[in-house]
Image (spheres, coloured by chain):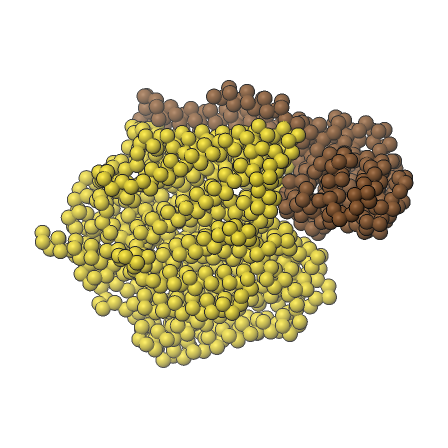
Amino acid sequence: MLAAGLLFACAMLAACNPEQSALHPAGQDAAELANLFWFMTAGGALVWCIIMGSAIYAVLGSKRPRSERFADRFVFIGGVAFPTVGLAGLLIFGLALLPNWAEADTPDLQVQVVAEQFWWRLGYEAADGSQVATANEIHLPVGATAEFVLTSTDVIHSFWIPSLGGKMDAIPGRTNVLRLTPTKPGVYRGVCAEFCGPSHALMAFPVVVHEADAYAEWLETQRQPATAGNGEAFIAAGCGACHVVRGISEAGSVGPDLTHFASRRTIGAGTMLLTPANLADWLVAPSHIKPGSRMPSFATLPDAERQAIVDFLLELK
Amino acid sequence: MTDKAAEERQLARVWAPPRGWRYLTDVNNSVVGLWYIVAAFAFMLFGGALALIIRAQLAVPDNNLVSAETYNQLFTLHGTVMMFLFAVPIFEAVAILILPPMLGARDLPFPRLSAFGFWCFAIGGVFVCGSIFFNAAPDAGWFMYPPLSTEQSGIGADIWLLGLSFIEVASIAAAVELIVGVLKCRAPGMHINLTPLYGWYVLIVGAMILFAFPPLIAGDFLFELERAFNWPFFDVTRGGDPLLWQHLFWIFGHPEVYIVFLPAIALLAMIIPTFAQRPIAGYSWIVLSAIGTGFLSFGLWVHHMFTTGLPAISLGFFSAASEAVAIPTGIQLFVFIATVMLGNVVRTVPMLYCLGALATFIVGGLTGVMVAVAPFDFQVHDTYFIVAHLHYTLIGGMLFPVMAGVQYYYPFATGKMLSRTSGIWSFWLVFIGFNVAFLPMHLTGLLGMPRRVFTYGADRGWDTLNMVSTIGAFVLAAGFLLYVWDCVRPKGKEPNAPRNVWNAGTLEWLGRVPSDNWGLRSIPQINSRYPLWDDKDLLDTIDQGRGLLADAKEGRRETLVTSVLDAEPLQVLRVGTPTWLPMLAAIGLAGVFIFPVWKLWWPTLGSAIFFLAILLYWLWTGTAEIPEKQTKDIGDGRRLPLYVAGPRSTGWWAMFITMTGDLTAFLAVLFGYFFFWTIHPDFPPVGIDGPGWQWPLTAAILAIVTWGATLAARLANAAGYVTLSRALLVAAPVGAVFTGLALMAGPWTTGLDPTAHAYPAIVWGLVVWVVAHLLAGTIMQAYCLARTCFGRLTPRHDADLWNVTLYWHFTGFSALLTALVIGGFPLLQ
């Protein structure tokens, strides 16, 4: 049965999507913690076998010690001495992994993260020192330590990229920091881990880890205003009241910045892949696809106008 | 011999349960305990049904069996029901049923209080559970974190807050009842170190309830003030902080886990020696480590908050404390194993469940050790790994032991046996189903699945794992239904279980089958931990009525009260008889908690008056009654008083214990004051004046005067100066009213607006808390005044005045402290 269980676990480990897995580390912390997990699991399994072995022996075994002194010794060794030493060791080993961000060097880059129901407002600092607003997709250079500065404007959220490391809460009125160091380029996935309302399950984001120059290139693109052509339908439908498209409409910023929307992989903070069909569906019934979403439905717009908005958005590379 | 037969008939008549509709008026522990157990299991089945819907929704990716809104209600209610309506109440239920016979008592000291607690629990539970049928259930998680729960939830949040506060009344009532029961109602000679281990656990858990539930009550109080009156305790835009709720909730929430776990382990501590056919191998180990576990459990709460951005020093400290609690917990398990090793094992179904509990709980304990390491918790916190961990601890540490306990105590409670075949089948179904459901969840969590998600995408690769978990959950449910069926199927034609069917050593097993209502024929002298094994003449002594209190000549229900440490007989306590009062009082109190959900203030007030009227009638007619004679012959040439007041009486202890819990709640509100001080650089904040020092100082002086007048009234009465005592009892309520007015005058005159900022809100919160207590205190003083005027309180019979004075020690202290803090602390800034 044990073997079957292990086999099942391995099969599952192989079959799962590694984008969002703490056991497929692509960052420094995640790798250390995955090792810690395997180490603790092995130790735990050993302890479980010893205790259950002695319990089953106690019930089924035929030879019985008869002295009370045996009981005292058994309890002392099993219940006091062994766990004290074992747990002290684990504590020293485990707490050594505690982040010491206060005394560490300054991070290589800083990302401002504001969690909102149910998406992520992001801010990067460009090479020229200007702030670059974006949303719902995080890009990082490999090998660099990124500091995420986390807060929230509504309820408590939690920012978690399992393949890079641990999570940290985004709490209204407070600012928390989390540092992560990706070690492998690739596309990963982060999620909100603290229950935050109806669409808690649909509050995710892709994480793209680049080589350093590709990252610089991405950031430079993001810094530019939008170059797309015809935003008339977008503006006429009132989209600009909530969404910024730099260079075209900068009136309201209640919702995600869409300046380089088409460069992103997903719609609705990781809810759906960005495809023309999905985008059209999204405009018709956002709060059906994503319960509790504050975006109104544009189902009443004539199809042609809605299509014009879709076309415009898909040009925002 | 005919004398003895007449005694038995009299005992049977006095302790006979009421019939027909009046069955619901019963207050005897053996009946109320059974109701309680049945109700707790009914809520458990309801919570289980919710879990099955959750599992069905998650069986396949992108499922739309239920909507996100419904799903959020389902998991919130599942957690709430399992914790507040099953795990904690089942402890109270089982303890009410088995504790008195185990200690050699006829009943608990306050049977009507048990019945009152049961009715509060049943009404509150139905109210909270029923909300889901109106799509109005709480939906912000069982932890109710603001601001989600304060600013975005509908009436579900109020139902949670008020409904559970109401149920907490039942928990506190049971804690008071059970603590006094263990301390004061043990059979003569049952020295504290001869108390059955179950009694020790009840004592420890009762004490934990007293210190753990009050912070939650304080949190609920602040929370409801914010919800109903917009006082911004948790609103960051007005100086509040959502983390205050997290602290208060988890200061309750972590001990809660051990409040659930220890009583279940206590059942193992009774079952294992019986089936090892030998005494526990390490009584002192168990007692000391249970105390240690209880103590440490209060120092762990921050491990639920590791990812809220606390400084590394806190993380390190609470990591270490969380690891440390594994040691006393482990000791208890090793003592059990050692006991089995030394004994001659009888292989029975309860033992099978014990082994299942051990196998499961150890997994939960080991993953607990893992998540106590803060950095590892950063990864798995709020994922399915934690879902797996907590279910291994709770099902292994609580459900399996309770199932073992039900198997073990079933013949005791009903006189019939459960089916061995059915027991074995249900065990394996539950055990295998459980592991199939929850073992994979460790992996699901590590592969990135967060908790509390109503759906997940097909591309995540979690579908097989979730399907396996769902199948396991349904197998578990099937096993549990089989178990329940075996318990409830009609057994009329089956033979009765033999007396002491398991050959156990403790007193609860000495009853005849079918059982007698009176519990014990007569109360024996105890001089061992396992009297049925060690004293071969014990059964005869008891059966033939040669023990103490073998008759009920005056036609009253009576039990013995003994001293706390040595169990020296002190008093013959006349306990409450069947009455509608507890149920009516619970209905009245239900109104007080339920109407505010819809802000129906007039019905709330009406319910409060109804509750108060019932309560006063209940106290007036049913407590501190002056007996027809001073002492009673209890046999063996001993005479004991029928009336005792002060620290030797059960009532004084009940007041002391209740007020300890109450003071803890007050201190938790006070903690809120200082918590806000720590998070604000200026406190009181710039632009908001404090309540000044003049009025608070006046209030402090008045509080001392009132407090002193109450104490003086007791002393004067005891010394025979009845008129002086009455004069003081007239003056004291006036003093209390002026204390309250002076306390309110401070923030009132300086114009502190509680909706403006967290600082005025917490000042007013403290004032409101104390004023409510002063108000209750005036009613108590007036009650004593009425009692002395009607001759129900005399210099010799002054229990009421003792208890009210004790109340005032606590309330006077709270009033004084509040005045000093709100008036004095701003001066230090």
Q: Residue at x 52, y 33 (%)?
A: B470
Locate residue B214, reporting x and y percent: 50, 55
Q: Is residue B701 above or below residue B671?
A: below
Q: Is residue B477 above or below residue B116?
A: above
* Residue in the foreground of this view, choosing between B614 and B130: B130
Report which quarter residue B510 is drawn in: top left
Q: Is residue B505 left or right of residue B816?
A: left
User: The chain drawn brown is chain what?
Assistant: A
Q: Residue at x 49, y 26 (%)?
A: A47
Q: Drawn colour of chain B? A: yellow
Q: Residue at x 23, y 61 (%)?
A: B556
Locate residue B124, reporting x and y percent: 46, 55
* Residue in the foreground of this view, choosing between B129 and A80: B129
Q: Is residue B17 left or right of residue B427?
A: left
Q: Is residue B46 above or below residue B469?
A: below
* Residue in the foreground of this view, choosing between B449 and B541: B449
Report which quarter residue B301 is drawn in: top right
| Residue A84 visible in the picture | no
Report which quarter residue B492 is drawn in: top left
* Residue in the foreground of this view, choosing between B751 and B721: B751
Locate residue B722, reporting x and y percent: 34, 77
Q: Is residue B610 left or right of residue A67?
A: right
Which quarter of the rendered picture does the C terminus of chain B lie within? bottom right
Q: Residue at x 36, y 55 (%)?
A: B114
Query: Which residue reaches farthest left?
Result: B1
| Residue A161 visible in the picture | yes
Number of marks in picture: 0
Locate residue B387, reporting x and y percent: 55, 37
